[in-house]
Amino acid sequence: MNADHPLADVEREPGVPKPDPVLCAEGLRRSFGGIHAVDIERLEVQRHTITSLIGPNGAGKTTLFNLLTGFDKPNTGEWRLNGGTLVGIASFRVARRGMVRTFQLTRSLARLTVLDNLLVAAKDHEGEGLWGALTGGWRGTEEANRVRAFELLERFGLDQMADEYAGGLSGGQRKLLEMARALMMEPEVVMLDEPMAGVNPALTQSLLGHIIGLRESGKTVVFVEHDMDVVQEISDWVVVMAQGRIIAEGPPESIARNREVIDAYLGAHHGEAAP
Amino acid sequence: MDWGQVFIDGILAVLGPVTAAYAISAIGLNLQFGYAGLLNFGHVAFMLVGAYGTAITVDLGGPLWLGVIVGVLASGLLGLLIGLPTLRLRADYLAITTIAVAEVIRLVVRSSWAQPLTNGVFGIQGFADAFFDLNPFPASELYGIGALVVTGRKLWTMLVGWALVVLLTLLVRRIITSPWGRVLKAIREDEDATLSLGKHVFAYKLQALMIGGGIAGIAGILLAVEQQNVTPDAYLPKITFILYVIVILGGAGTIMGPILGAAIFQFLFFTIDALMVNAQANVAWVGSLLSPAAAGQVKLVLVGVGLMILMVFRPQGMLGSREEVLIDER
């Protein structure tokens, strides 16, 4: 990490405050029965960075995503986007406020065309109200959205498939479509839940390029990932979760050497001589 | 065996006001099931509420036009009442609730407790005189082309019925081809994904349930007015399932599907009916094999076989797209 990087001087410890946090969670806890799926003292996400969330299976990464985006409710805790609280805010309103998520298992709207998948994501469309639909007068907005949708489709290499059903796309193309669809909402924070899961290496590279492109276009990216190599390559900051807690935070190079992280991934007793 | 008469009976049934009413009701169900993916298994209740809303209003001394408005609003409101507690839950809860609500409403309407208002099992008759007063055709005169002959009374209800079909089809087409309709289809495909795109899924589902319910109310009113009669036991659950057959047969999620589905269903039903009656009376070996009552039962078997054959060869319905059916839902 360069010395002039905004996160260069931030302490490498769990829950550390950031200079310019866009997203901030405090005392977030979600239990399923006796199990604390998520139990976080504090988490801040720096604006205009790529923050990756890693951890072994069952660490609570997806649950945390669900909590932050309103798809699940915590038992206690508060979290804010740009200083505005998101406690008790419905998932679709969170999305409208500028924090958009994707899903671990891609969710293309199968029997809508690729183009419609994008168009439906556009915000503030007067034709989406019943009154607007009846009276018409939404075609201007539609036309502007269409132009923007085609730009995005081109950027993600899907423009040739605009009129095909999304259900006919390959798994990798659906990942791209889902990302393009999220961008159609002009979000500020993009939350990607395992965007690289089940994708071939060539497409992984292309997806990584797109994620870096997101940061360059001024968005904040938070993404869940298993593969340490991928994380090393593109993240500005890495948050490591295990058993619902944040056990480490820091730039990727510091995480790879972190004892606790290695223990969490490989078990605490690895490398010790057998008794 | 009079094949010509069998065919004419079928065609007359298709053109009749009952087919128009089924088509209208199917348009409402198609909006809910075909476009929004809502499993409403109590569609017949919306027709009942529409019909009774009209009949009771007139029975209490109100004018028919007011009765029609009351009927449509009441059936839309039923959508709100059912939707508010169930549409936030998983899809199966709506299915269970609607099927139960439909039966409960029918049983309440036919109960002696409700008799002062609904006249119980006997129902309400003769509330639509105002409608037939408007009839420009002399009621008992015969109108027709060739062998297709109807009375002036029937011609009037036919015309009004099919005009309503056209009007409501245009209305549904307008809202479905708009961005509003696109959100509805997105909800049908994946609710969570649609939520993640910032859409108020619950509000859309509620709107679809209410509009579809209101449209079913119009169908119920048309049927009741045509027969000048409402009785609770005309609104059995099987009507709901006939409407599902119509929607799926025509092609769920298509604009013209409900109309074509209603036409095919009625044609199949009434030609086979006429065929069985004709064969039972005129063909010696059928007559000796089947009593008239048994012929009625065999008719239903044949209708079922006919529907099965249609679905085997066109699982997507008459107007549905083959491609859509082949998409596996991953």
Image (cartoon, coloured by chain):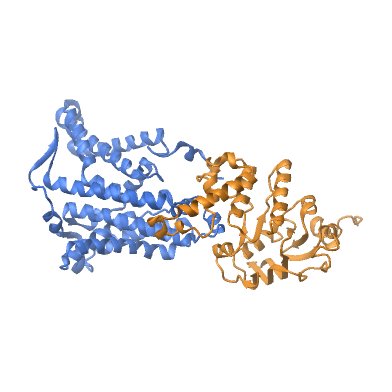
Chain colours: A orange, B blue
- Please give the name of the residue rendered at 20% of the width and 35% of the height, measured from the top-left corner: B274
The answer to whether residue B263 is seen in the rendering is yes
Whole-percent x and y of residue B203?
45, 62
Whole-percent x and y of residue B320?
41, 39
Of residue A16 and residue B304, the one placed in the foreground of this image is: A16
Image check: B223 left or right of A154?
Answer: left
- Name the quadrant containing residue B235: bottom left
The quarter of the rendered structure image containing the C terminus of chain B is: top right
Q: Judge whether A198 appears above or below B274 on screen.
A: below
Of residue B271 and residue B29, the one placed in the foreground of this image is: B29
Whole-percent x and y of residue B296?
22, 39
- Name the quadrant containing residue B252: top left
Number of numbered markers: 0
The answer to whether residue A108 is seen in the rendering is no
Whole-percent x and y of residue B45?
31, 58
The quarter of the rendered structure image containing the N terminus of chain B is: top left
